[in-house]
Amino acid sequence: MHADELFSWAFHKTSSKEIAEDLVQETFLSAVKGFKNFKSSSKPKTWLFAILNNKIIDFYRKRAKSSAIGSKGAEQNFTKQTNSYFDSNQNWIITGNEIAWEEEVHLLDDSEFNKTLDECVNKLPDNWRLAVVSKYLSDKTTDQICQEMSVTVSNYWQIVHRAKVMLKKCIDHNWQH
Amino acid sequence: MLKRILGTVTFSCWKITEMVESEAVTKLSIFDRIRYKTHLGVCKACRSYEKQSALIGKALSRLMSSSPQGVKPMDNLAKQKILDRISKNEK
Ligand SMILES: [Zn+2]
């Protein structure tokens, strides 16, 4: 039934047993309801994971909304931090700590690299993580994501931009290879 | 110094990293496209960023769509609850 796999995944993404259980439950209920729409061309597992991933994004969204006031401070700090990587002319400040990790195609299969990236994503403020995760996790259009996050399109790209700069720097600092 | 001149003739690094992200690159005028390319041509940091950004994107898509290694089993009680809910719904 894939329940364990779904649960592991949800747990990994939410770090909470209770929330993960709820999300898996909702996933199965949606799956039962939507069974008519299930195309036999896709594997049941893929289909269930797609539903679960949407539930996880919903969860992130709710959390981002409920912590909107509290996370304002965190967002400001991260904004300051991303600014600090650039000089007054808005060019990169070269620290010498930059490591070359752009050429290596095999990084995608490097579990250490993926672990570092995952940790870096989890360090982002809720709203930034939501923006990045929605961009890569869902098949939603930019407009849909913006609507759900209640931000303008240009605002959304600004968040994605800052989040990506942050991720790059986080990998620069934390990935030992 | 070279950087400062570049900033006015081409774009700043900040602007470039923004453009890399937003797919705005595809909608640039020919003039701006030349400015963009020129910047990348002389700025190693942004060239590096462009590739890293794409790599992060790819890695994220993969990370998000793959299941984690090592399956953590779900409580039997929680599973039973799901089955109960489903059978209730079907009635
Ligand atoms: Zn640059």
Image (cartoon, helix red, strand yellow):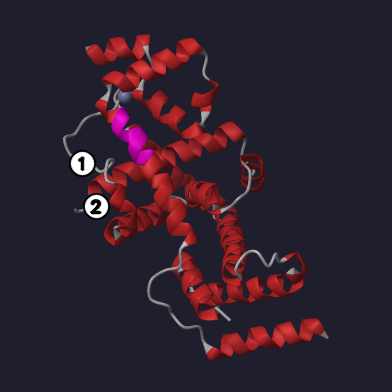
Q: Is residue B17 visible?
A: yes
Please indicate whether residue A75 sits to the left or right of residue A30 in the image: left
Return the residue found at the far left. Answer: A96
Q: Which residues are magenta?
A: B46-53
Q: Label 2 is found on which chain of the structure?
A: A
Q: Check whether the beta carbons of the residues at disc 1 and disc 2 lie within 8 A of each other.
A: yes
Which residue is at a point 57% across and 62% down the rendered structure image?
A53
Q: Is B81 placed above or below A116 here?
A: below
Q: CA distance from mark 1 to mark 2?
A: 9 Å
Q: Which residue is mark 1?
A: A99
Which residue is at a point 59% across and 55% down the rendered structure image?
A61
Instruction: Name the quarter where the N terminus of chain A is drawn.
Output: bottom right
Which amino acid does the dot numbered 2 rest on? Trp
| Main SS category, magenta section | helix
Please indicate whether residue A151 sits to the left or right of residue A166 in the image: right
Mark 1 surroundings: few (<14), some (14-19) or many (≥20) residues within 10 A: some
Q: Is B86 placed above or below B10 here?
A: below
Q: Which residue is mark 2?
A: A175
Which residue is at a point 37% across and 44% down the rendered structure image?
B55
Which residue is at a point 53% across and 54% down the rendered structure image?
A137
Q: Position of residue A143 (x, y in %)?
A: 65, 40
